[in-house]
Image: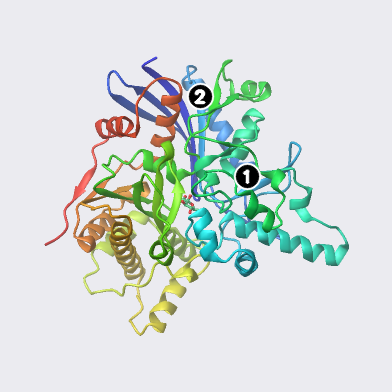
Amino acid sequence: RGAGTVAAVDLGATSGRVILGRVDQRAGTLDLEHVARFPNGPVRLASGLHWDFTGLYRDLTTGLADAFRREPSVASIGVDSWAVDYGLLRGDRLLGEPFHYRDDRNAAAVDGVHAIAPFAELYRRNGLQFLPFNTVYQLAAEQSAAEQSAAADGVVGGWLGLADSLLLVPDLIAFQLTGRRVAERTNASTTGLVGVHTGEWDDELIERLGLPASVFAPIVSPGDSLGALRTSVAEQLGAPAGVEVVAVGSHDTASAVVAVPMDPESAAYISCGTWGLVGVELEHPVTTDAARDANFTNEAGVDGRVRFLHNVMGLWLLSESVRWWERDGEAIDLTQLLAAAASVTAPVSVFDADDPRFMAPGDLPGRIAEWCAEHGVPAPQTRAEFARSIIESLAEAFAATVRQASVLSGVDVETIHIVGGGALNELLCRRTADRSGLPVLAGPVEATAIGNVLVQARAQGFVDGDLVSLRALVSAAFTPRRYEPAR
Ligand code: LRH
């Protein structure tokens, strides 16, 4: 006790990683060792846009096996990923690859859900900002697909009717590892089907929407043990007896917020990767009309905290633009592109990063140009100008969202913390400081994995204390880079 090692599996929308975390509270140290990194991304099948869950599981278990070779004393494993997406199971069998939240099946399902439960009522119940891919809309899309196939071939119920459980992505991985079926609380809070005040499945809403209540697994909290690895899995991983899987903040953003070295009474955070999650940490949800109109969410945090935030489009705007430019095989060096963007001197247009047209994969530069044309402002011409326009638009959205978070929650924000991959983007950090007029503290980059590690380490008894002590460990181990706003 007082020190030990755990393994974090952290899956983002563009890459996954396995990281060893060594924690020693007496020495006040926290070390990360990167064991594996593997790509992730959507796969377009005949049925739509999916995740390659099977490939991800192969890669993460290969990474875990490597982790046990390097460090046989690993005490536990914790898994986090992006939110809202799920797999359906019948018995042990996965019913197809999970849908990707950027699939376009959801948009058509939104009105049907709101006809049964209007958005204002949903917001009072679940406290969530409107995002067309929240699980509740994805399940409505499953239902309408089932109705269509019933009309066509007489097979009633569809995949949802066939399923006996629905597990969100990290829970689906925990199930493969342990055989336990649970719904970890922070991620379950993103489904739209959990009460914002109760923290439990909203059975009445589930019933009204005609969803099968029995598919939802019991809710567990970060820090709860999910039990030992299945014997065959332990053999495959080369794991010694007794290694367990521990529930962490399995929503990646919940784990990231644990590792923001902040004082929540005077700071805002931006967890910046594919998305920019911009907000504050609160003790109680804010579900006022003003918060609803500003589309702020109240997601469940670790230790009963509330992540009061708004989804800003994030580095997706850049990564998907680059993917578009690279579609004919050309390779683009991101560092060079950002350097070129930083040296653009002519003013570039700032577009609304939140516009829903930027959500789906495809020609993002074309859609940015289209937005500019519609709004009578000059469209960027070169790639460097596009990159600069994206960074300026993100920085502007970040600054505006921090101001809104402060007004809506009453938190007097004096500093902005940027964690995640975006903390490495100097131009973005600097322009966020400039546009907000507040100092930006950038880092740690691996906040999500660190939050995952710390919650496990606490469950193992390697560290104790509340979020304040966990964040003190983060502060001691990682010095953020400070950006002062230009005067
Ligand atoms: C970030 C994230 C975000 C969700 C989105 C689906 O990775 O989990 O918090 O809104 O992915």
Locate residue 85 relative to residue 378 in the image: left or right.
right
At 63% from the left and 69% from the top, the residue drawn is 115
Residue occupying image coordinates x 62% and y 30%: 177
Q: Amino acid at mark 1?
A: Phe
Residue 289 appears in the picture as rendered: yes
Number of marks present in the image shown: 2
Instruction: Please report whichever mark, 1 or 2, sits nearer to the chain's N-terminal start.
Output: 1
| Label 2 crowd bin: few (<14), some (14–19), many (20+), radius 10 Å | many
Q: Is residue 360 visible?
A: no
Task: Classify 290 as above or below 36.
Answer: below
How many residues crowd mark 1 within 10 Å: few (<14), some (14–19), many (20+)? some
- The label on residue 53 is 1
Q: CA distance from mark 1 to mark 2?
A: 22 Å
For image coordinates 37% across by 39% down, the residue present is 258
Quarter-wise, where is residue 333 in the image? bottom left
> Callout 2, which amino acid?
Ser
Q: Quadrant of residue 349?
A: bottom left
262 versus 280 height, above or below: above
**Mark 1 element type:** helix
Q: Quadrant of the C terminus?
A: bottom left
The label number, if any, that marks residue 76 in the structure image: 2
Q: Residue furthest right?
A: 154
- As helix, strand or loop, the secondary structure at mark 2 comes to strand
Residue 22, percent from left and from top: 38, 24
Image quarter of the N terminus: top left
Q: Is residue 57 left or right of residue 316?
A: right
Residue 328: mark in rendering: none
Using residue 233 as the reference point, say whether residue 186 is left or right of it. left
* Residue 419, position as x, y percentages in the image: 33, 46
Q: Nearer the viewer, residue 331 or 56?
A: 56
Residue 306 placed where, x, y %? Answer: 41, 46
